[in-house]
Image: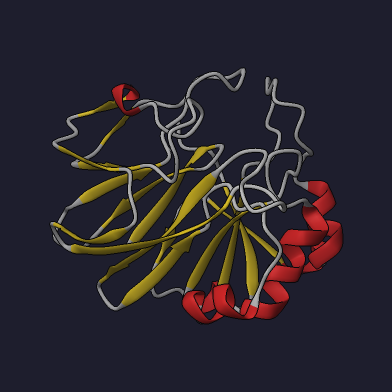
């Protein structure tokens, strides 16, 4: 499986059979989403900065709800979680999605805002890759994200939903999360191709695809 970062919470996942999925395509964050084409779009919730499906070319199927799906070479499963720390009273729910292909398992946390609970951690397990928001305001903040990483112990961490140049959401930049997890533990990459032994145990900072 190949993973490329499109900015915000959007990733382009490509399976060995060529199936492509874009997660949480966005608009309205202050900078444009790079051009992307995919077979499927999967949205963790229907806010505009996570469900701009029209911004992705070639989409033939869209997933917006928890459940189990076969999308070409991917097995996709999702379960609901809270967008905030008051059981959805402020922002409702999101869906945590898992993407399995080619022997790899990727967990995309969406706009997770709730604190970790034993039940939630049991559902997540220990994925190969954890995509987690780190910018706060609408999600867990840097310290909250670091706590998830400590408890889940994924092989590879991919931070997302942080401030990028031109951003207008008022969320924190990446540096706060890196200070929590250790800047010396970072690896910068253009794309992540799994398996990737060199990235295991690291926070991988993917370049935004252009």
In terms of image quadrants, where is residue 60?
A: top left
In terms of image quadrants, where is residue 55?
A: top left
In the image, residue 210 sits, relative to residue 141, either above or below, namely above
Decide if residue 116 is in sight here: yes
In the image, residue 73 sits, relative to residue 196, either above or below, namely above
The answer to whether residue 76 is left or right of residue 112 is left
Residue 44, x across and y down, in percent:
43, 46
The answer to whether residue 19 is left or right of residue 55 is left
In terms of image quadrants, where is residue 196?
A: bottom left
Q: Residue at x 67, y 48 (%)?
A: 84
In the image, residue 60 sits, relative to residue 15, either above or below, namely above
Residue 203, x across and y down, in percent:
65, 64
Count of labels in the image? 0
Residue 24, x across and y down, in percent:
43, 40
Q: How is the image coloured?
A: secondary structure
Foreground residue among 50 and 82: 82
Q: Residue at x 29, y 78 (%)?
A: 103
**Which part of the image, by quadrant, shows the N terminus?**
bottom left
Residue 139, x across and y down, in percent:
68, 46
The answer to whether residue 100 is left or right of residue 18 is right
């Amino acid at each position: 499986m190949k993973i490329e970062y499109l900015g915000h919470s959007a990733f382009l996942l490509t399976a060995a059979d060529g199936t492509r999925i874009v997660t949480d395509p966005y608009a309205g964050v202050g900078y444009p989403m790079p051009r992307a084409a995919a077979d499927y779009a999967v949205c963790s919730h229907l806010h505009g900065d996570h469900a701009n499906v029209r911004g992705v070319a070639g989409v033939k199927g869209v997933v917006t709800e928890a459940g189990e799906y076969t999308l070409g070479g991917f097995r996709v499963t999702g379960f609901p979680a809270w967008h905030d720390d008051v059981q959805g009273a402020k922002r409702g729910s999101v869906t945590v999605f898992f993407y399995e292909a080619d022997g790899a398992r990727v967990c995309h946390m969406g706009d997770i805002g709730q604190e970790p609970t034993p039940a939630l951690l049991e559902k997540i397990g220990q994925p190969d890759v954890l995509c987690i928001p780190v910018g706060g305001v609408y999600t867990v903040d840097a310290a909250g994200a670091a706590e998830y990483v400590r408890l889940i112990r994924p092989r590879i961490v991919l931070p997302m939903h942080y401030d990028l140049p031109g951003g207008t959401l008022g969320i924190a930049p990446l540096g706060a999360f890196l200070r929590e997890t250790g800047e010396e533990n970072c690896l910068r990459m253009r794309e992540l191709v799994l398996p990737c032994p060199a990235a295991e145990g690291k926070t991988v900072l993917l370049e935004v695809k252009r």
